[in-house]
Amino acid sequence: MAATDLERFSNAEPEPRSLSLGGHVGFDSLPDQLVSKSVTQGFSFNILCVGETGIGKSTLMNTLFNTTFETEEASHHEECVRLRPQTYDLQESNVQLKLTIVDAVGFGDQINKDERPIVDYIDAQFENYLQEELKIRRSLFDYHDTRIHVCLYFITPTGHSLKSLDLVTMKKLDSKVNIIPIIAKADTISKSELHKFKIKIMGELVSNGVQIYQFPTDDEAVAEINAVMNAHLPFAVVGSTEEVKVGNKLVRARQYPWGVVQVENENHCDFVKLREMLIRVNMEDLREQTHSRHYELYRRCKLEEMGFQDSDGDSQPFSLQETYEAKRKEFLSELQRKEEEMRQMFVNKVKETELELKEKERELHEKFEHLKRLHQEEKRKVEEKRRELEEETNAFNRRKAAVEALQSQALHATSQQPLKKDKDKKKCIHLDGSKTFTLASVS
Ligand code: GTP
Ligand code: MG
């Protein structure tokens, strides 16, 4: 349908007229129908517990819902913060509640001072919901909504001030989730210290611009109690599932050598206030705020990031198809640009490698020439030595031949004059005197 047709139809819409009914029709049962439908459908509620290891998160959850959830103690040596969700089906009267408790395991311990895993977890639940909404065949009716409805932020009862980790984390979370700060293990801090601590915490939250959840005051039925409770924040709570006899009643309490701290005694701690505000009065508001405020913000940012826009005043009405086409074109040209960029990078890389290879080849060639020269030089020297040796051998052979020739001449001459030789022999014997050998025996 063209934009102008849309405009024509919307402009032609007539003003509704008020009419009175002649008698009972029955649509006044709509609220009851709604309640009945919701009850049949059941509810889901998701609580995120953030606080250092051993601060009393599991105990408080057990105390709040008056049951024993599966708990697994966290070690103080977790390598990083991990989110552990556990879902339970609870029933009270005819109301079904799918309760998910998410523990930020390891938070605040060792070097686990990073709130990012918590933020990522919250975003991931929003993203899952958004993906379901954007499906062509969506089934939000029976979708298990895991979006976090409330974050109970457990503050350590130091009596000093908030840790910077607490401030940073709460600041990062406040636009994504309803935060209710609570002072844990409030029985470990004195009454006057607790009073000062509460004032200090609220002052620090305000001066650091941290937005915590405010119990709504727009519904007359609960405006008064919510306004009073807002002034009590942060709630100082004590958790315990242990039952102690006080008077003739069994109450949940923590027993000490000097006395008993009763969990549900408003003079002892704010546990009842927390339960009243969180479960009995504002559970639906927390669910609604999560959807209409936090999820809406996430959805808006996500869709804007994807290029979708609402029309404003005089601009053209928003068209999903046009936006999609524009985005598609943008995406394709971006893809082309990236492809071209990568191709260019590849060509440059090849050129670079080619140059490097050429340079290496030249170096190798030079090395080869150098070695060749050295080899030739060596060869020439060896050749020279060989020649010298040959000359020496020839000279030696010549001398040897001459000696042999002389020897044979001498022998020849000797055989021609035997008598003379005998005479010489005798002469030798005479000269020698005492010895009786001959020259012939010597040779
Ligand atoms: P991890 O899940 O291991 O991080 O611990 P957690 O925060 O769930 O604490 P958990 O409830 O397991 O409690 C740890 C210890 O603190 C237990 O010994 C509890 O009995 C004790 N504890 C819990 N709540 C309170 C409280 O309100 N006051 C005091 N004094 N001790 C508490
Ligand atoms: Mg625990």
Image (tube, rainbow, N blue to C red):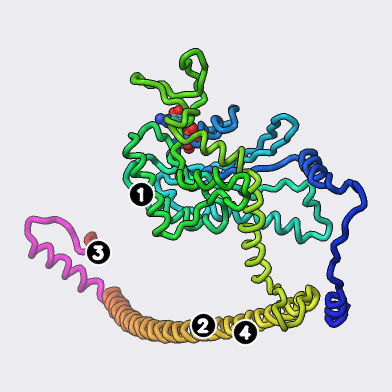
State which tag comes first along the sequence, 3 or 4.
4
Q: Which residues are magenta?
A: 417-439
Give the label on residue 356, or none: 2
Q: CB at mark 1 closer than 8 A to ligand 1?
A: no
Q: Is 434 in the magenta?
A: yes
- Which residue is the site of mark 1? 200
Instruction: Please name the amino acid that badge 1 sits on.
Output: Lys
Disc 3: which residue: 443
The answer to whether residue 394 is seen in the rendering is no
Task: List x then y, in percent, for residue 173.
Answer: 52, 55
Badge 3 marks a residue whose secondary structure is: loop
In this rendering, the label closer to the viewer, 3 or 4:
4
* Residue 23 in view, yes or no: yes
Residue type (three-letter) at the residue carrying disc 3: Ser
Label 1 close to label 2 by CB (< 8 Å): no
- Label annotation for residue 344: 4
